[in-house]
Image: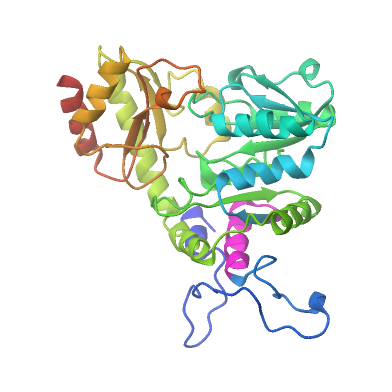
Amino acid sequence: MNDATRVIRAGLPKPSQAEPFLPGPVFAAPFHLSGDPARVPYSYGRLHNPTWAAYEAAITELEKSAATVVFSSGMAAIAATLGVVLKAGDTALLPSDGYYTGRSLASDVFGRFGVTTRTAPTASGIHSESLRGVKLVWLESPGNPSLDVCDIAACARVAHDAGALVAVDNTTPTCLGQQPLALGADFSVSSDTKMTTGHGDLILGHVSVRDEGLAETLRTWRKQMGAIAGPMETWLAHRSLATLHVRMERQCRNALAIAQFLGSRSDVHDVRYPGLPGDPSHAIASRQMKYFGPVLRFALPSRAHAERFLSNCELVYDATSFGSLHTMAERRARWGGDVIEEGCIRLSAGCEDAQDLIADLERALDR
């Protein structure tokens, strides 16, 4: 079955007369329960929920994983993955150019509990000499906002040989664009707030794993930490998942067209998109990615120039996050934490017409 069909059917129950295709969200804290709780599928809303179960089944199918655990946000999914692997005295290796809040969580929060973190650039990959004593290798490919990629399969082999587990933040390409578990990773982590659900109207995350034992530790973490997803958000996510293939094809096509346009401008530099044949990441990305994602980056000469450009855009929203139907861009350095130019713009291509978007960008740059 092809992806375009799989995303529409994933996680749906078998057809039943007079029943909806996708059952509505189940709002419940307690469920009727008598006797042994282990004999019933649902007992209390912090432990399990049928709306979670349907969405998790859908993502498990698309990730080609042993199991999936849904969380209240992408950061909750990151925290859970770190939390079930690392303890006092352990060391984690993270990308120095990956998502800043993830790095901050590992170093500032888990660091207070005795976890040591090291960092290395995504583009350099990992090497056995850098893995001495490392318990968890965290990869983000493409990196955010660097858009560098690493050879996930090669990194996983080296990490496993050194006795480390491997987690991949797969938010940007999604499970349709890249399959970290098939490439050897132990955890595939995603902020489903972004491209997976794609409408900019909910916060959610998930972790998919190759081993059911890891899934059980994640479920225990979720239960004990209370990092549970709301039924309404989870149902909306499952509903939105059905259009992922359609959105991915349009948004990646738009991202490439925009990157090509920006590369033709003399007032724009450092255009990065893994889908560009001349991009430093293109060779590796082409081997392991089916889609290159909606995100690209470029730089303008200064902070003031970048801010004027954004204020001149009409179709492109000045907003954080990415992966929405709406095209968004922001001067990424305004958040701090990343080693990037003050005029660096991260742009997430939406589903609008590419010619309209390029015309809007051209007008804003010319002004």
Residue 319, how many percent across, how many down?
34, 37
Question: Position of 123 compared to 203: left or right?
Answer: right
Residue 146, how many percent across, how many down?
49, 23
Write down the quadrant of residue 14 in the picture. Answer: bottom right
Question: Position of 148 compared to 227: left or right?
Answer: left
Pick the residue in front: 223 or 258.
Answer: 223
Residue 66, how many percent across, how many down?
72, 55
Q: Which residues are magenta?
A: 51-67
What residue is shown at x 74% (from left), y 48% (from top)?
210
Pick the residue in front: 249 or 187.
Answer: 187
| Quarter of the image that includes the N terminus | bottom right
Question: Position of 183 compared to 328: left or right?
Answer: right
Q: Residue furthest front?
A: 112
Pick the residue in front: 327 or 354.
Answer: 327
Vertical placement of residue 299 versus 351, above or below: above
Q: Is residue 65 magenta?
A: yes
Coloration of the structure image: rainbow
Vertical placement of residue 248 versus 151, above or below: below
Q: Is residue 290 magenta?
A: no
What residue is shown at x 33% (from left), y 33% (from top)?
329
Q: Main secondary structure of the magenta part?
A: helix
User: Is residue 99 visible in this depiction of the protein?
Assistant: no
| Quarter of the image that includes the C terminus | top left
Write down the quadrant of residue 252 in the picture. Answer: top left
Residue 67, how many percent across, how many down?
70, 56
**Count of numbered marks:** 0
User: Is residue 22 visible in this depiction of the protein?
Assistant: yes
What residue is shown at x 20% (from left), y 22% (from top)?
365
What residue is shown at x 24% (from left), y 43% (from top)?
353
Vertical placement of residue 226 versus 349, above or below: below
